[in-house]
């Protein structure tokens, strides 16, 4: 049996496959940098007992070459839990690249709470423009759009102040507190994505979304070789897919796949190994 995992900090999707049948399970998320070995074990304990496992491919936050110690910790805990002979712990960006392009070539992008992108070829990352997080970057992400929405509403550029406050039961003071004084401000800002999606018929909101995707292109996609196909994975990409495709095709990008989850693509990739 092979196990393929796609994990963020809050939730993790696990695919258990024997090549014929595939089962999917969800556990709490695992961030190899933020979580202790004990916390990782608690998340793994949420999985049902597995048949003998030959390989585990884990793609998640806090893994990969940038975080060697955290990756080693993740591999150690996965091996102890599953007893598999082959264990890989890689970045979620590499997971996106393999899911979207397999062993082909293109620009793989993640648009979710945050954003990221890479030029990939042969199932590996060739080049990555650093995302820099929601304060310094993450253009096109849910957090960036939430930030732009709040800015536009309170500075008077988006005429939806009463609707927004009523929809979320918030006050100006609470928003400021949640953004500047509490953890996970990026998730808080990204939580406004459903409101944005529901109001894309408002010209100011629609233009804000288009501008956000345009900034993602100008700050990130423009740094990769031109002419390559560009594909996307993530909740923001999937929910705003029509506007995303429309915006980027107007700038002569060749847009390919837009999907919410990398699961199907990763399953296909690892079945080909």
Image (cartoon, helix red, strand yellow):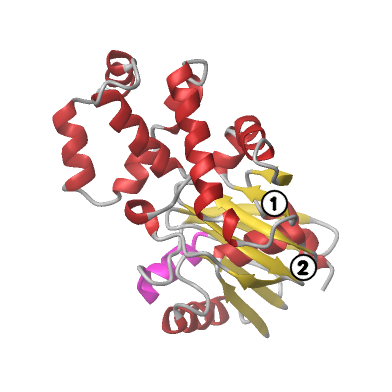
The residue nearer to you, when weighing 149 against 31, is 149
In depth, the one of 250 and 90 nearer the eye is: 250
Q: Does residue 180 appear left or right of residue 223 in this picture? A: left
Q: Nearer the viewer, residue 42 or 192?
A: 192
Q: Residue at x 52, y 64 (%)?
A: 129
Magenta segment range? 35-46
Helix, strand or loop for the magenta stretch, by majority: helix
What is the number of the mark on residue 51? none
Residue sitting at x 50%, y 53%: 219
Q: Is residue 160 left or right of residue 172?
A: right
Q: Which percent across, then down, holds residue 171?
A: 18, 25
**Which residue in the protein does label 2 denote?**
270
Q: Helix, strand or loop at disc 2?
A: helix
Residue bearing mark 1: 230
Q: Residue 125: percent from the left, percent from the top?
A: 64, 71
Residue 51 is situated, as x and y percent measured from the top left of the image, at 70, 70
Residue 199 in the magenta stretch? The answer is no
Circle 2 Cα neighbour tier, 10 Å, few/some/many (<14 / 14–19 / ≥20): some
Residue 224 image-quadrant placement: bottom right
Percent across and percent down for residue 208 are: 45, 30
């Amino acid at each position: 049996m092979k196990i393929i995992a796609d994990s963020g900090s809050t939730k993790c999707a696990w695919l258990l496959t024997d090549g014929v049948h595939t089962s999917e399970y969800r556990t709490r998320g695992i961030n190899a940098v933020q979580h202790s070995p004990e916390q990782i074990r608690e998340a793994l304990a949420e999985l049902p007992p597995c048949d003998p496992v030959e390989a585990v491919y884990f793609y998640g936050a806090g893994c990969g070459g940038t975080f060697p110690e955290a990756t080693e910790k993740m591999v150690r805990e996965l091996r102890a839990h599953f007893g598999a002979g082959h264990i890989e712990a890689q970045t979620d960006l590499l997971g996106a690249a393999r899911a979207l392009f397999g062993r082909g070539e293109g620009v793989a992008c993640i648009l979710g709470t945050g954003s990221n992108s890479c030029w990939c070829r042969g199932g590996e990352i060739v080049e990555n423009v650093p995302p820099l997080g929601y304060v310094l970057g993450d253009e096109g992400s849910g957090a960036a759009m939430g930030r732009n929405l709040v800015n536009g509403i309170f500075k008077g550029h988006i005429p939806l102040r009463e609707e927004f406050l009523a929809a979320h039961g918030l006050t100006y003071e609470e928003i400021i507190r949640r953004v500047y004084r509490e953890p996970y401000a990026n998730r808080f800002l990204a939580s406004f994505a459903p409101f944005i999606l529901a109001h894309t018929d408002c010209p100011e909101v629609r233009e804000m979304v288009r501008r956000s995707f345009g900034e993602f292109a100008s700050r990130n996609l423009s740094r990769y070789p031109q002419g390559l196909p560009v594909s996307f994975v993530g909740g923001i990409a999937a929910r705003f897919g029509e506007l995303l495709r429309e915006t980027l095709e107007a700038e002569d990008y060749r847009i390919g796949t837009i999907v919410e989850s990398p699961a199907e693509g990763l399953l296909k990739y690892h079945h080909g190994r």
